Image (cartoon, rainbow, N blue to C red):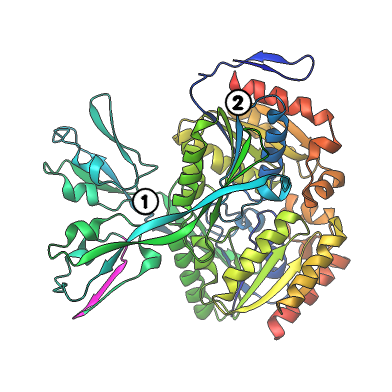
Amino acid sequence: MEIAVISGKGGTGKSCISAAFATLSEKIVLADCDVDAANLHIMFNPEKEEEQIYIAGQEAIVDYSLCDNCKKCIDYCRFDAISYLNDKIVISPVLCEGCELCMRVCPTRAIDMKQNDKSRMHSGKFRNGIMVYGRLAPGEENSGKLVNMVREKAKLLSKSHNLKTIIIDGPPGIGCPVISTITGVDKVVIVTEPSISGINDLKRTIELTLKFNPKIYVIINKSNLNNDISNHIEAYCKDIKVEVIEKLPFCSSIVEAMTNCKSIMEWEPKSKIANKINMAFKKITNN
Amino acid sequence: MQIIANPGIKKTMKIAPDKSFKIAIASGKGGTGKTLVATNLFYVLKKNIDNVALVDCDAEAPNVMGFYNNYKFNSDYDITLKAPVIMKEKCNFCGKCKEYCSFNAIFLIHETIQVVYDLCHGCGACFFACKYGAIKEKHLKLGKVSHYSNGKESSIIESRLKIGVLSSVPVIKASINESDKNQICILDSPPGTSCPFIQTIEKADYVVLVAEPTPFGLSDLKQSVETLKTMNKKYGVIINREGIGNFDIYDYLKFENINILMQIPFSKKIASCYSKGDILVDFMPELQNDFLSMFNTIIN
């Protein structure tokens, strides 16, 4: 069973809640799919048993010995990635989407493609099972495909090690890596916070998630920061028949736990908040 | 040009008067306080400069307008992608368009040909490839760019991704291009270090990274700094929620010789103020000078 933890807004506490879910009694597979800001490996320091290269697309490069500055490539590029600067053709690696059209239209064959191969996927044992995490190299793209690769690996490992539950820590937003994170998962936990931004992002995240038909659960984190908005979120969820399974109060020990590289379940297993997270997880896995 | 700010602050801007100066507010980790900084910096600057714009580049989770509901809607327009439509009566299933597509967006088996629009980047390679004139193009809606203003020249430009669309990049690009006529632009960037972040930063003259002093915050800050180094950008750091976590971030910033532009303490008052969509400097006027002096550091 794949359980994805996401949130439209960043910083609502996704990773801390995923970490807590990952350290309840049962051994699990943990997949960190927040590939451009992967953090759970810092907390869990998994063994690096396997490393795989991820090809994050490609970019066009010019061979100036062949280029005759005809500028045909500039006319064809739809991403404004090619310009004519100081008497030569310059391709911006940032704007280039790697479509190869410039390479194909070039009459002198002066353009070639270079693969972006600095991103990695790691997997290995950690203290409560197996962990898979992707790390997108700075500035590289196609994060959605790396998310797919991490999920595939997590599924393989869950079969080979006979671990039933996969916990996926997702990225923020509603774009391509999020869509890759929730496509086909069994359950989605959306972590929100009671703020104007939080509720707006929650609405957009629910609307996106509904397109994929998983079971949806909402957790309102830091609920006591604004009780009015917190109640408003509950009412909204009730209206659209999405279950709010837990309201977690703001709690400084979650940050303390993280600073000490522990989940809240490991740091203060007997605390009220640990108990609430435990109950929430039982509800998620049992229905 | 001169900006006459609050008493005691009077600076000359060393920027070209005819060019727009863009400051991006960014962070690797989500929820570190980007929007808090962007909305407050805009608030402080527009008291002093006429022609300032705030651009919400977080098209996946646009939240700026939650803080400026006194701004009135002006206009909006759709951002689209030119995607192929294959006219089956003209197609002879040669497969050249599929071969030219670098994104595997064209699916062909025998005499069945289909475009997977979610994968299409709108590059036009298939259109170029087809020798039978069997491909025409249609506009696919990706999102919206909206303009808001408060009657004066100050304006807010919001990018908003249509739900279910994969890439926010074209929408972000369009929103930033719209702000070119403003002299100072504040870009509220999306989180992370991949395409949406890069597209925002690419246009920025200066990047303010907002980070929190926790292990996760530091790890993401390092990733952002590495990205900015490869892009040769000028940048500095705001430490938000100062007081939580640990001191590792200070060692890192010292080691890397990165300027700390400002520190915002951790307080429930700030969190509660932000949660309601209020502007912080209204409640903590002492921060106003911090924002202004940060701005002066940036432009000089």
Query: Looking at the picture, how far across and down is residue B41, in whole percent?
Result: 69, 33
Answer with left or right where residue A190 lies relative to residue A275.
left
User: Residue at the location (51% across, 66% down)?
Assistant: B164
Q: Say which element carries label 2.
A: loop
| Residue A15, quarter of the rendered image | bottom right
Answer with left or right where residue A203 lies relative to residue A252.
left
Query: Looking at the picture, how far across and down is residue B279, in whole percent?
Result: 78, 41
Q: Quadrant of the N terminus of chain A?
A: bottom right
| Residue B224, quarter of the rendered image | top right
Residue labelled with disc 1: A117
Query: Looking at the picture, how far across and down is residue A275, in whole percent?
Result: 84, 71
Verify CB contact (< 8 Å) between mark 1 and mark 2: no
Whether residue B159 is in magenta: the answer is no
Whether residue B107 is in magenta: the answer is yes
- Residue B234 sits above or below residue A270 on the image: above
Residue type, numbered disc 2: Asn
The residue range painted magenta reads B103-111
Query: Looking at the picture, how far across and down is residue B269, in whole percent?
Result: 87, 45
User: Residue at the location (65% across, 62% down)?
Assistant: A7
Residue type, numbered disc 1: Asp
Answer with left or right where residue A193 lies relative to residue B160.
right
Pointer 1 local density, CA inside 10 Å: few below 14, some 14–19, many at least 20: some
Residue labelled with disc 2: B257
- Residue B2 sits above or below residue B298 on the image: above
Q: Say which element carries label 1.
A: loop
